[in-house]
Image: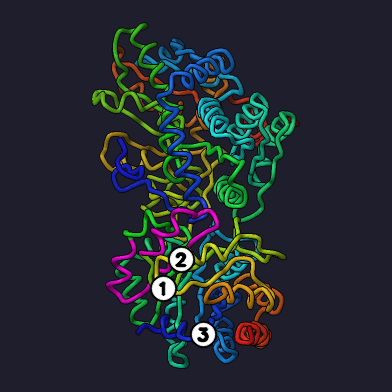
Amino acid sequence: MSDKKGRFGIHGGQYIPETLMNAVIELEKAYDHYKDDPDFNRELTELFNEYAGRPSRLYYAKKMTEDLGGAKIYLKREDLNHTGAHKINNVLGQALLAKKMGKTRLIAETGAGQHGVATATAAALMGMECVVFMGEEDTKRQALNVYRMRLLGSEVIPVTTGTATLKDAVSEAMREWTTRIDDTHYCLGSVMGPHPFPIIVRDFQAVISREIKAQLMEKEGRLPDAVIACVGGGSNAIGSFYHFIEDESVQLIGCEAAGRGIDGFETAATINTGRVGIFHGMKSYFCQDEYGQIAPVYSISAGLDYPGIGPEHANLHDTGRAKYVPVTDEEAVCAFEYLAKTEGIIPAIESAHAVAYAQKLAPTMSRDQIIVITISGRGDKDCAAIARYRGEDINE
Amino acid sequence: MSRISEAFKNKKVFIPFITCGDPDLDTTKACVLEMVKNGADIIELGIPFSDPTAEGPVIQNANLRALSGGVTTDKIFDMVRDLRKETEVPLVFMTYANVVFSYGMDRFFGACRDIGMDGLILPDLPFEEKEEFAPKCREYGMDLISLIAPTSKERIATIARDAQGFIYIVSSLGVTGVRSEITTDLGAMVSLVRENTEIPCAIGFGISTPEQAAKMSGISDGAIIGSAIIKILAEHGKEAPEYVGEYVKTITDAIRAA
């Protein structure tokens, strides 16, 4: 999928300060060594199974299927993982790798707080120091997750620069890494940033599609017709897509956060509104103005509120192998409520973007077709915000 | 001989940095002329970027002030065109890869040639990605300045052998900003550079006092100062040119006396 220097088509690369170059080279060498190391993989599998609760269920959503009256719908329940989201897959992999590399300290950025909580969790488990950078705006939107990270022994640093959201948290984590490299691993939370991060994170998240494939084969004896996942940076989506990329019959659909709509400025739909640029270590699509200034983006979902997308997704878009559709706040909130009432499952507002598109797609497909939706996280963290969206003020 | 090479001939150089458009372009232009009047040898002009990941808080804020004041790459080109009527000092742009990439390479470098720019520094463009920009830079007669950091180690030789104009030695880990002391073994880094190239090198990041500037230019071929100047801009705004001039004089005096 990627060639020299971590390129996916024209995307990817290593656009970072010289100060960090040896750190990413060291990381690449370590990863190349450990990724095929039987002991490393045994340890990681044990962490996945015994600690994170893998494999996650592939659940047949019977009521939703009947209600929509089209394709058969399966939900990949990443929300049932320990810490409540797919983020733990990547974090356990990176923390274990960092530990093997002799690092004693993890730093991370977080948007909704799920990656921060996962990193804080892995750090607690493995006895590592942990510092999480989180946009000040997001620390307010996701106060409960800030508390969880601190409870797990991590330091949370509110980032006040720029728009005080996810992109600023990434910038600040990158700045921190240039200050302290020897003992510190930057545990990047999505399939983005400089090579080798997009590959490392994808490989650790690819467990999602590996399981979907095996589970669906067991239940239905066939491949799905469509796999749908939400996309911010794109880690749960690439994890859900990866083992299906070669299977041309499987439609791969990423759902971008359109915020208040892709015709206005209050959106975070990168592929639908952005253009090719260079930022946060990679070439990819970014929301930006005519002079290349990165645009402030907006979504109700703090986890999708990012002006870029991982380089492998950018290439899947360029080649037409995957398609990326915009889903608005309103559609996502309706889907959030729909899944709760229909299946008794409260999805993360991020994942609700994927549910919303499936609601549109399923009725257009026939009953013998199959859709898999990745429920990347659980929605407890979002209840207060959705209540506010509906004009109801509740205390968290 | 290029204007940059000329500047390094038989002397230690001082390279001050300023963010264009902070607080406005008239002030930037007046500051540059004060810098030249007070002995600055090369001027580093920052084109602001929304998310400057290699900068500390001082220069981050300058970028924000400039962008919220409405400065754009085109307006900066116009300012430099005006500036060139009054000075022949070597001018180097410092910005981020996306500012150049998104403007369009030929369009950007073409404009740089037309207004008389001498070089370009992109802190998020390491050796591995250099070939995307370097051929265009050469085609339009500009030097693409390479950076070397305290973590570069065995990379120094490779980077130095391929360098143009001058080499920017990053004095310390971390982002730009004033530091009370610089602990990196810079002498060893400079020796490695000199074993591999004839190109001069200057040290930046963390320098603010005349003593530090004299020491750094003693070790290398020059000193680069950014944040300390931006602090003067932050304090004095449109009144800053006079104070910037005074500050630059204390630095050039110290460098020349050393």
Helix, strand or loop for disc 3: loop
Q: Which residue is mark 3?
A: B11
Q: Nearer the viewer, residue B143 or A328?
A: B143
Tell me if I can see residue A25 in this picture. Answer: yes
Query: Label 2 to label 1, Cα distance in Å?
Result: 9 Å
What residue type is disc 1 on? Ile
Q: Is residue A242 left or right of residue A288?
A: left
- Taking the spot 59% from the left edge, 16% from the top edge, the residue there is A51
Q: Which residue is mark 2?
A: B193
Magenta part of the protein: which range? B133-161
> Is A301 colored magenta in this rendering?
no
Counting from the top left corner in percent of width and height, residue A328 is at: 48, 39
Q: Quadrant of residue B12?
A: bottom right
Q: Amino acid at mark 2?
A: Val
- Of B228 and B49, nearer the camera is B228
Depth check, front residue: A43 or A387: A43
Pointer 1: what residue? B199
Both on one chain, marks 2 and 1?
yes
Residue A338 locus on image (x, y percent): 52, 22
Q: Earlier in the sequence, mark 1 or mark 3?
A: 3
Residue at image point 36% right, 12% down: A214
Image quarter in which the N terminus of chain A is found: top left
Chain letter, disc 2 residue: B
Mark 3 belongs to which amino acid?
Lys
Q: Earlier in the sequence, mark 3 or mark 2?
A: 3
Q: Chain of mark 3?
A: B
